[in-house]
Image: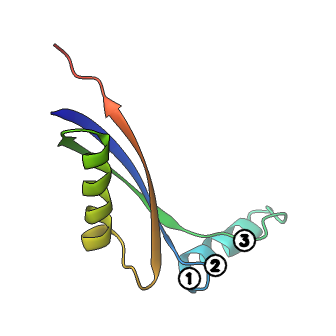
Amino acid sequence: MATYLASIDVMLKPLVNDPQGLAVHDGLGHLGFDGVQKVRVGKRIEVTLEAADSSAAETAVTEICQKLLANPVIEDFSFELAEVATAG
């Protein structure tokens, strides 16, 4: 079994209202950052898991996202997967 690190990004879908993004945008404007046109706020989650190969790890991470980490009605997810070197 190999160990993998999945770096997962979950973002609201483009047509979903993003109140956190609007608040950050307003705050940046108050701080003098007038060139900022749009802000979207999401979350980044890192999951370390063991799997037989990268394909199995990818399948597991996709299931994790679909079943727990992302709400498919209002959020999209993407991830990067990297094998983690183990000592020994």
Whether residue 47 is visible here, answered yes or no, is no
Residue toward you, 15 or 17:
15
Q: Is disc 3 placed on a helix, strand or loop?
A: loop
Q: Where is residue 26 in the image (x, y as percent from the top left)?
A: 69, 75
Residue extending furthest toward the right: 35
Name the residue beneath numbered marker 1. 19
Name the residue beneath numbered marker 2. 22
The residue under the point 60% across, 70% down is: 40
Q: CA separation, marks 2 and 1?
A: 5 Å
The three-letter code of the residue at mark 3 reads Lys
Going by the image, does 40 lie left or right of 88? right
Q: In which quarter of the image is the C terminus?
A: top left
Among the two numbered marks 3 and 1 on one chain, the one whose residue lies closer to the N terminus = 1
Residue toward you, 67 or 30:
67
Quadrant for residue 14, please give it.
bottom right
The three-letter code of the residue at mark 1 reads Pro
Among the two numbered marks 2 and 3 on one chain, the one whose residue lies closer to the N terminus = 2
Q: CA separation, marks 3 and 1?
A: 12 Å
User: Is 62 placed above or below 7 here?
Assistant: below
Name the residue beneath numbered marker 3. 38
The numbered mark at residue 6 is none
User: Is 33 placed above or below 84 here?
Assistant: below
Do the residues under discs 2 and 1 have CB atoms within 8 angstroms? yes
Q: Is disc 1 placed on a helix, strand or loop?
A: helix
The residue under the point 39% across, 79% down is: 72
Q: How crowded is mark 3: few (under 14 residues within 10 Å), some or many (20 or more)?
A: few
The three-letter code of the residue at mark 2 reads Leu
Q: Where is residue 3 in the image (x, y as percent from the top left)?
A: 23, 35
For marks 2 and 3, give the one nearer the viewer: 3
Q: Where is residue 44 in the image (x, y as percent from the top left)?
A: 42, 56
Do the residues under discs 2 and 3 have CB atoms within 8 angstroms? no
Q: Quadrant of the N terminus?
A: top left
